[in-house]
C-alpha cells in the first residue's frame, strides 16, 4: 500500500484503474476528484512501469479523469480485449447458473 502513484506503478507489468465515482455515487464525484487528484494514469505514469506493461480498465472510463486519452488509446491499452473476455466469462457464469441440475 502506498500514497505515491510513482511507487505504485514502478516496475509493474499491469497498470489498472477504475472510475473514481461509479454510477449512483454522483454526489461523491467532486470529493473523489479532489481525493484522487494526482492519480490519473498518464503517459508519464506508464513510463514508470516495466517495459511492455499493459494498461487495463473495466470500463466505462472517464477520459481525462482517471486515465489520459493518450493512454487509453495507446498500444499499451488492452481495454477492449478485457471487455470481450469479461463478456464471455459473464455468459459462461449465466449458462452454468441456468443449467438444470
Image (cartoon, helix red, strand yellow):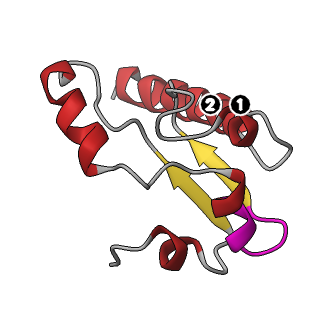
The answer to whether residue 83 is above or below residue 27 is below
Which residue is pictured at 41% across the width and 73% down the height? 4
Within 10 Å of disc 1 (Cα), the crowding (few <14, some 14-19, many 20+) is: few
Q: Position of residue 89 (x, y in %)?
A: 55, 35
Within 10 Å of disc 2 (Cα), the crowding (few <14, some 14-19, many 20+) is: some
Which residue is pictured at 67% across the width and 37% down the height? 79
Viewer-side residue, 6 vs 92: 6
Q: Position of residue 20 (x, y in %)?
A: 33, 38
Span highlighted in magenta in the image = 46-53
Q: Is residue 67 left or right of residue 1?
A: right
- Please identify the residue farthest to the left as the structure is shown: 27
The answer to whether residue 58 is above or below residue 11 is above
Instruction: Say which quadrant the C terminus sits in.
Output: top left
Q: Is residue 44 magenta?
A: no
The label on residue 80 is: 1
The answer to whether residue 2 is above or below residue 98 is below
Q: Position of residue 52 (x, y in %)?
A: 84, 66
The label on residue 55 is: none
Q: Main secondary structure of the magenta part?
A: loop
Question: Dividing the picture into quarters, in which one does residue 68 lie?
Answer: top right
The label on residue 83 is: 2
Instruction: Say which quadrant the N terminus sits in.
Output: bottom left
Label 2 with label 1: CB-CB less than 8 Å:
yes
The answer to whether residue 21 is above or below residue 74 is above
Task: Indicate the secondary structure of the residue bearing disc 2.
Answer: helix
Count the marks. 2
Gap in Å between the C-alphas at discs 2 and 1?
5 Å
Q: Position of residue 17 (x, y in %)?
A: 48, 48
Viewer-side residue, 87 vs 11: 11
Which residue is pictured at 24% across the width and 49% down the height? 35
Question: Dividing the picture into quarters, in which one does residue 100 lie?
Answer: top left
Q: Is residue 97 left or right of residue 62?
A: left
Amino acid at each position: 500500500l502506498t500514497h505515491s502513484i510513482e511507487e505504485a506503478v514502478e516496475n509493474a507489468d499491469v497498470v489498472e484503474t477504475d472510475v473514481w465515482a461509479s454510477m449512483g455515487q454522483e454526489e461523491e464525484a467532486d470529493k473523489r476528484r479532489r481525493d484522487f487528484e494526482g492519480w490519473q494514469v498518464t503517459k508519464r505514469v506508464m513510463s514508470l512501469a516495466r517495459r511492455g506493461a499493459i494498461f487495463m480498465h473495466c470500463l466505462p472510463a472517464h477520459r481525462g479523469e482517471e486515465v489520459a486519452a493518450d493512454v487509453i488509446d495507446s498500444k499499451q491499452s488492452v481495454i477492449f480485449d478485457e471487455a470481450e473476455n469479461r463478456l464471455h466469462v459473464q455468459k459462461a457464469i449465466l449458462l452454468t447458473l441456468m443449467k438444470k441440475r
